[in-house]
Amino acid sequence: MKRVLMLALLGMFSAGMLSACNTVAGAGKDMQKAGEKVEDKAHDCRDGKC
């Protein structure tokens, strides 16, 4: 019984970690897109004409 409980906990922990990786990867892509927008705006405003 103890072994089954440990395997169940390990499985739940592994599933949680895998889903967290997808979430973090998605957040990273969103941050990258936001950074690109900031860079584009900075490039447009470098001569002081925003």
Image: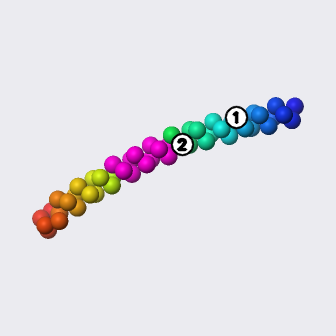
Badge 1 amino acid = Gly
Is 27 left or right of 43, judged from the image as shown?
A: right
- Mark carried by residue 11: 1
Residue 5 inside the magenta-drawn segment: no
Q: Secondary structure at mark 1?
A: helix
* Residue ID at (17%, 59%): 44
How crowded is the residue under tag 1: few (<14 C-alpha within 10 Å), some, or many (20+)? few
Image position of 48 with respect to 33: above or below: below
Is 39 left or right of 25, judged from the image as shown?
A: left
Image position of 13 with respect to 46: above or below: above
Percent x, y of residue 26: 44, 43
The stretch of residues the image draws in magenta is: 23-33
* Residue ID at (20%, 60%): 43
Please tell me how many numbered marks the rendered image carries: 2
- Mark carried by residue 24: none
* Residue ID at (29%, 52%): 36
Q: Secondary structure at mark 2?
A: helix
Percent x, y of residue 16: 62, 40
Q: Which residue in the rendered view is the most extreme toward the bottom?
A: 48
Badge 2 amino acid = Cys
Disc 2 and disc 1 in contact, CB within 8 angstroms: no
Q: What whole-number distance in Å separates the C-alpha atoms at marks 2 and 1?
A: 16 Å
Percent x, y of residue 14: 65, 38
- Mark carried by residue 21: 2
Characterize the magenta stretch by its predominant secondary structure. helix
* Residue ID at (33%, 49%): 33
